[in-house]
Image (cartoon, coloured by chain):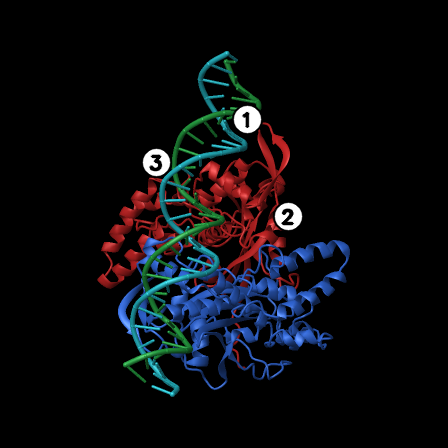
Chain colours: A blue, B red, C green, D cyan
Amino acid sequence: MDRPEQQALLVDLNAVVLAVTGGQPRVLTVSPADYPSVEQTLRALPFGPFDLERDRTLERCIHETVARQTGGKLGFVEQLYTFADKGRDPREQVGAGRVLSIAYLALVQEALLETADDASWEDCYAYFPWEDWRSGRPALIDAIEKSLRAWLDALPGKERIVQRDRVEICFGSGNAGWDAYRVLDRYELLYEAKLIAEYWVDRDQSPPEPLVNELGQPMAFDHRRILATGLGRIRGKLRYRPVAFELLPDTFTLLQLQQVVEALSGLTLHKQNFRRFVERSGLVEGTGLREGRTGGRPAELFRFRRAVLRERRAPGVASLQPPREA
Amino acid sequence: MDRPEQQALLVDLNAVVLAVTGGQPRVLTVSPADYPSVEQTLRALPFGPFDLERDRTLERCIHETVARQTGGKLGFVEQLYTFADKGRDPREQVGAGRVLSIAYLALVQEALLETADDASWEDCYAYFPWEDWRSGRPALIDAIEKSLRAWLDALPGKERIVQRDRVEICFGSGNAGWDAYRVLDRYELLYEAKLIAEYWVDRDQSPPEPLVNELGQPMAFDHRRILATGLGRIRGKLRYRPVAFELLPDTFTLLQLQQVVEALSGLTLHKQNFRRFVERSGLVEGTGLREGRTGGRPAELFRFRRAVLRERRAPGVASLQPPREA
DNA sequence: GTCAGTTATACTCAATGTGAGCACAAATCG
DNA sequence: CGATTTGTGCTCACATTGAGTATAACTGAC
């Protein structure tokens, strides 16, 4: 039971707080003010220390951390991942020792969270423009694939085979097509292929390729990686758990529900089939009330049907297909 | 950027190492030797300190930790969950401060791991007898449901409604039936209902209900909870990732593959349909070779088809149905 | 008030996937 | 040899899904 001397170790919590407003997926960000060697124009995810005195549990801590920065209450909360790689936090370089961050995912209705001065809601896809396929395959993907091919060609033979498979799986150039769920895989691939701005920031260099500047807004620290983890998780969860309802008010139209799913998954869905699925699955029940301001025929207001949890094994939007080629 | 004084904090890694042999799911365990106030007959999951000097990454650490206890190499490895609740580790009571554990899941072919003196492979279902439905609905479930009903009846009205739903969802008494994936939900429910031995150990009491002794072997610390997390994760993963192959040798018969899936999921599958699915999905390819010692007609040997990763979005055993009532 | 525009909702059809079972094939064991 | 065991091919009914057509119910312009 010998244990090495504990060196300096900081434990932080990070929150990926997601909402959907105006059909757009948003993430709560703060300013990384006063942190060493961090570009002050960058945004960061809400974060704070895990306080051993105050926080009996991690969940408690994440609620407090977010509350301190927004004053609001979180709905759905779930642990995402723990990050501990050496060198992942610039504080390590100024002698703070090692920084370990435990990331959480939280879903809220944006309306319910007031934001403090330095907090703001940002469009998720500003950080991952290649992840938004709602208007068809983003043109950006062509440039990415071209650049990845160049990267592959420069690799030694054996490695090239492995990485080519990876590229095909991540970007769906094979028959499998686009898998919305693989957000993190794609981010990490692009990072390794030196196409992500943070790759160059981490090395105190400036990117040689102009494409890097097109591949989304960078974030402070490794927070873009954490956000990618969160977005991937919610996309996966959508398939088998009724998480979309966490982002909606009590009653909503089927179009609103569909738009939440589309915003998160980055895909467009066939409207009639979505409706058929969601009604037959028992996920919702009509209220009889109608929503006026739709611009056309008024839509019925629905509410989430809790009983579905007892009736279906994996209640979610099982099949998330990418849109057909236009 | 003020940060409270860091109190004593230990960071451990835990490994849930799973294998399947003889159609049984096994978990690698060690003896929790020399730990304070831990019954020495109990088994624990392999664990060790996260060493800030030695371990640049958590993955590195988990490989080293397991290697130290077995000498073998891990195949598939994935982070599970980070546990940090106050009071979860008895070392806290002897002044060690707070213990934070990062748990990993690893899959291996049992043959590939030699075990050291105090390590051993145990049957997973020895810890969760209610999770094994391969011979139909375990009779134990009746006793569990009876006991849970008694627990529900003792709850105050409002709470009772909430918990009754939870019981129904966990144990499939509603229409949804049994969801193999909810291993952790069930463990936590049973714990809260005071039916898990660890509940009483944690409180230095002895269980009033004899049923507690039927509900599986207890483990040291909160390791049974961690194992439940791991088993749930692998059951979920089975549906959309080809993880079963991590537990098999390079070539295998379809029956072996089916038995791995059955062992992990705790369900029995229709043989012909399983075969149809697995062949048509492109998950495997025949080798032309035959396996002799089957006891009947020799079976063809198959191998995993890597190309499936490029061809299918979520290659796994999508539909895991519980067996029909016999 | 009519008509174009817009959104909601109902229904059809073909293709595919899934649960369940029957039947036959190819080995082993006495 | 026949009984037993395991593997493999096939069928059938049924549910689910992708895609499209058609109709309903509102708004605002004129």
Residue type marked 1: Arg
Q: On what subunit does the disc labeled 3 rest?
A: B
Tag 3 secondary structure = loop
Number of residues whose C-alpha sits closer than 10 Å to that of mark 3, classed few (under 14), some (14–19) or many (20 or more): few
Q: Residue at x 59, y 33 (%)?
A: B300
User: Mark 1 = which residue?
Assistant: B297
Depicted A172 relative to depicted C15: above or below: below
Label 2 sits on a secondary structure element that is loop
Pointer 2 residue: B73
x and y percentages locating residue B59 in the rendered image: 61, 58
Q: Is residue A231 above or below residue B219?
A: below
Which sits earlier in the primary sequence, circle 2 or circle 3? 2
Q: Are marks 2 and 3 on the same chain?
A: yes
Is residue A129 visible to the viewer in this orientation of the structure? Answer: yes
Q: Which of marks 2 and 1 is nearer the N terminus?
A: 2
**Is B90 situated above or below A126?**
above
User: What residue is disc 3 on?
Assistant: B326
Asked whether the residues under marks 3 and 1 belong to the same chain, the reply is yes
Amino acid under label 3? Answer: Ala
Where is residue B88 drawn, in percent x and y? 44, 60
Instruction: Pinpoint the chain carrying mark 1.
Output: B
* In the foreground, A221 or B34: A221
Q: In this view, does B205 lie to the left or right of B317?
A: left
Chain at tag 2 = B
Left or right: B304, with C6 as reference point = right
Residue drawn at the location 57% of the way across and 45% of the way down: B283
The amino acid type, in three-letter code, at marker 2 is Lys
Name the residue rendered at 61%, 66% in the picture: A187
Q: Which of marks 2 and 3 is in front?
A: 3
Looking at the rendered image, the quarter that the C terminus of chain A falls into is bottom right
